[in-house]
Image (spheres, rainbow, N blue to C red):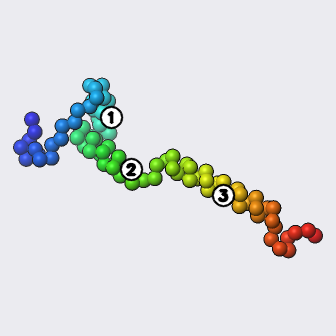
Amino acid sequence: MVVPGLKARYVDVYLPSENAKLEWKEEAKNAGLPMSKFVFAAVEAFRAAKDETPRSDMVRELAEAKKISKASQRAKDEDPAPGEAGG
């Protein structure tokens, strides 16, 4: 039963299985949170993460940056600055 003053904020959540509910309940307990606060925190973390760059994108960008850096270094090694060549 929902407390009358909280009815406007109440949400029913149906999980795919009883086992999923037990897992969530255990994780909430381990975090020292009631289930409602645990679920709220998880949803808020998910919402915040959607604005971040996905890890796969960061890995790809890093690989591209390394490739450019290596190519730049090779070009620099192959074409020394004036005054450095031969001697």
- Dot 2: few (<14), some (14–19), or many (≥20) neighbours within 10 Å? few
The residue positioned 10% from the left and 44% from the top of the image is: 7
Indicate left or right for 37 with 65 as reference. Answer: left
Mark 2 lies on a secondary structure that is: helix
Read off the residue under disc 1: 27
Q: What is the quadrant of the C terminus in the image?
A: bottom right
| Residue 33 position within the rendered picture, expressed as x and y whole percent measured from the top left | 27, 40
**Quarter occupied by residue 42:** top left
Mark 3 lies on a secondary structure that is: helix
The disc at residue 15 is: none
| Residue 44 position within the rendered picture, expressed as x and y whole percent measured from the top left | 31, 48
Indicate left or right for 20 with 8 as reference. Answer: right
Mark 1 and mark 3: span between their CA atoms?
A: 44 Å
Indicate left or right for 20 with 2 as reference. Answer: right
Mark 3 and mark 2: span between their CA atoms?
A: 29 Å
Read off the residue under disc 3: 68
